[in-house]
Image: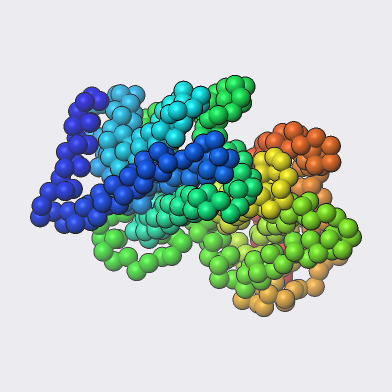
Amino acid sequence: MVDDLLRLKFALLVSALRPGSRRAVRSLVVAGLVVIVAGGMLMAGSAVDVTDPGQRSALVIAAGALSFGILVAPLAAGLGSAMEPRRFAAFPIPPGRLALGLYAAGFVGVPGLLAITLAVSVESAWSEHPGRGVAVAAGVITALTIILSSQLLVAIAAQLAVSESAARAVTGTARAVVAVAIASAVLAAVVAVRGDDEAALVRFASVVGRSPGGLTWAAIGEPGGEVAFRLSVAVVALLALGALWFGVVNRLMVAAQRQRPAADRRTDAGLGWFDMTPATPGGVIAARSLLYWTRDPRYRVVLLGLPLAPPLIMVALLIAGIPLPLLWLIPLPFLALFLGWFSHNDAAYDHTAIWMHVSAPLRGAADRWGRLVPPLVLGVPLVLITAPLFALWSGIDNGFEALAGISLGLLFTALGVSSVVSALAPYPAARPGAGPFDQPPLTGSRSFWAQAGSLVAALGFMSPALTLAWWGLIADARWLPIAGLAGAGTGLVMLGLGVLVGGQVFKRRAPDLLSLAQRT
């Protein structure tokens, strides 16, 4: 089975370069770019002096960035690969053997070539130093992880992004990520060669070394205990991804193919967000929520106002005498908290349109999940992209783990609490189409208790993680990674519980929600 799939993969690669093929020119251009990137990695690896802290840090940064770029590279070529697991559903192939064969075939092609080249280039940088053995192990583990992760991404994206607009969005995003990864690697190399800011490279490499992309690369040259810990975590992650891959292949072999009829594709006038979300109750609600968040002035004024609050808080604390390094850790958690808290009254924002949710045979959890998609789509990338920068600017050891974990925890916890509060205690909101500052008369103290209660509840659930983070800042920085893990774990648990409990409350109080919408 494995050899058959490998032969099929080789045949597909050869056919793409066949003269007269419509894709031949594009394939030749891609092949040229791959040769340039691979050659650049090999030359850079052989030229790195790992005894220089700046160049060693640049190697970790570049390797981490390129690892992520190679991982998403298959999506940059577009969806619809002939090697997707769903393509083999009609054949009597055991899912386990198919998963193993497709994984092996993943090493034949551009991602496999680049992953192996990256591992070889890092190993060549350490070839004359004591860390060579660790470099080989790190390269092998990382290459295996990159290919497995890319296979998972392609399979899942092909199943979810069934519309042309969604496929274009996925492809465009992947190409942007690849470009940013290459640019980041080149920038790190240039800064290291110039030797302008070695301290910044070292600090940023410490942040990258704690991320999934740089975990193994940062292990090279470290003490034995650190090496064992990092490689053990990487192996556990690889095994978990392997189990997930076998499960995904097994699921796709029996799941119905999600595609639109040909007639729909010919007459598609473009449904915007509805084209890009799954054709499920939760997907439809997610599309409606995304439409509100991008077009409704009631939502847009909040999105414009959210970034203003953290700088104002920073200025006030700076005037009060708080040291500047600590202040860099404040904006992102506040932004994440208020982004999640804003959804505490989202059911009332639907106004009379909520009757569709009440009358449809809809699970409450689907309604809750659909409404959480916009803040999750906005908040999670925001935290993951900006947390390394704020941690770097603060200069605090282990600041990245604490900042990312606490921020994600506050976002998830606030969303979980909002899922319950928006169904349990909604209050009148501005009508659709009204100005962003138009508000109806508030009924008693209901609005105050809903707003204050949801905010205090989110902070209360996160208080253990926040306490650990504070202790790490004032006493022992070794507590900061633990605080980050505690924060992220608390957030995930509270998000899941909030959706489940909020879904039950929504179904039970659906008539009351509709009555409130009709009265205001």
Q: Quadrant of residue 474?
A: top right
Q: How many marks?
A: 0
Q: Is residue 5 left or right of residue 210?
A: left
Pick the front one: 405 or 250:
405
Res 345 → quadrant: bottom right
Outermost residue, left side: 20
Residue 343: give x, y in percent of width and height: 68, 57
Judged from this view, the residue extending furthest toward the right is 320
Q: What coloring was used for the rendering?
A: rainbow
State which quadrant residue 514 falls in. bottom right
Which is nearer the eye, 50 or 57?
A: 50
Q: Is residue 57 above or below residue 327?
A: above
- Residue 121 position within the rendered picture, expressed as x and y whole percent measured from the top left: 40, 37
Which quadrant of the figure contains the C terminus?
Answer: bottom right
- From the top left corner, tell me how far across and down residue 65 is, in percent: 48, 46
Residue at horizontal 36 percent and vertical 40 percent from the top: 42
| Residue 385 in picture, x, y percent from top left | 58, 52
**Residue 112 in sight in this render:** yes
Q: Is residue 278 among what the camera can see?
A: no
> Which residue does the image show at 84% across and 59% down from the upper left?
317
| Residue 329 appears left or right of 21 | right
Position of residue 506 in the picture relative to residue 468 (left or right)? left
Whether 86 is drawn above or below 4: the answer is below
- In which quadrant is the N terminus drawn? top left
Which residue does the image show at 62% across and 40% down from the upper left? 206
**Which residue appears at 25% of the width and 49% of the height?**
31
